[in-house]
Image (tube, helix red, strand yellow):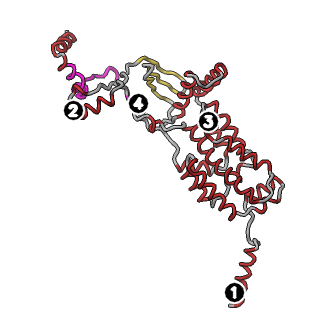
Amino acid sequence: MKKTLLFFALCLLLSSCGWFNTEPEIATVLTKHFDNKLYKKFDTVAYDLVFNKKLDELSKKLSNPKVITAFYDSHQNNPILITRFYTNGGLDSLRSYIEASKADGFNPEAFKVNELTDLLGTLNANQFKTIEEVYPVIAALEIRTADALLKYHNAIRYGAVNPRKIFNRYYIANKRPDSLAMDSLLNSEDIFAVLKDAQQTSKNYLALKQALAFYRDSLKTDNNPAIRSIKLNMERMRWQLPMKTDEVVMVNIPDFSLTWLDKQDTLTHMNVCVGSKREATYAEKMKLYLKSGSLDDKPKNHETPQLFSVFNAIQVNPIWNIPVSIAQSEIYYQAIKVPLLFVEQQHQSLL
């Protein structure tokens, strides 16, 4: 029993002296990169306290705080991204891509590029006198890198905004990144592939990107209706449809046209009829109609709905009967307004 207690006490003594502690990977990476033994003193327990404090401080400013917090909880708050991507230039590539996001219509500072650049510069300078000075820089750089990577990737690949949260009549459910996809992004072993994969490569998008550069060079300002229109259309093209297919039929409602495409080849292009824009007072009139129930108060709505659907057949020259909804809300409405004129028009149409 005494031998067992003696052995246990000896183990505690050796452990407290750090004899059984393995050097954290971040210490190995930075020591080798800078040829500086200071980083060998990196204490994960001391760093963990600093990291948690910094994460609490920045959490309200992060684009996806829950995803980032869960990611580091699962990795014991280790600086995963710096360990993997600092010495191989991955973090520099992230900064370069963000700086280049201006060509896609973004303000790079939306991704905190200046703060990211300053933190990278501080670490690159390697001017720390104590290991305690290293911890807050590593913690801030790690958190800012995770946030910038997620925010940049999601904005470039899926769009900066979810249209359904802005337009209450945007009915197409666009593909958006979920927490599982973002966690997978942070766990990636190849940041270069992640950044490349996020880029838009369609012919139309690249044409708009080229047009944006041309107008900027010509006008020397971004405060111009043409430039704002290009940026808006680039954002719309980043919104991902729930399914992709080589063959597609697109209806351009403002252009009154339909185009049938097979990859980049146009199979058919034709003019089509579309509905009219809702009247400006539609919402107010609808409230009145819901109270009164009178067809006289019902506002007209002839908008062509937005939809995304799959079809496998086309009916040529279909027989069309007036739907009950149109008969009640339009035909009947006209009939009670001017019954004699309506009857005469209907009679003339039969002659």
Residue 16 lies in what quarter of the image?
bottom right
Q: Amino acid at mark 4?
A: Gln
Label 3 or label 2, whichever comes before in sequence order: 3
**Horizontal side of residue 57 vs 323, given as left or right:** right
Q: Position of residue 128 (x, y in %)?
A: 79, 54
Residue for point 63% across, 48% down:
146
Q: Amino acid at mark 3?
A: Gln
Label 3 or label 4, whichever comes before in sequence order: 3
Give the CA distance from mark 3 to mark 2: 52 Å
Q: Which residues are magenta?
A: 305-334
Residue 96 vertical placement versus 189 (above, below): above
**Horizontal side of residue 29 vs 222, given as left or right:** right
Kindly identify which residue carries mark 1: 5
Label 1 or label 3, whichever comes before in sequence order: 1
Give the CA distance from mark 1 to mark 3: 62 Å
* Quarter occupied by the N terminus: bottom right
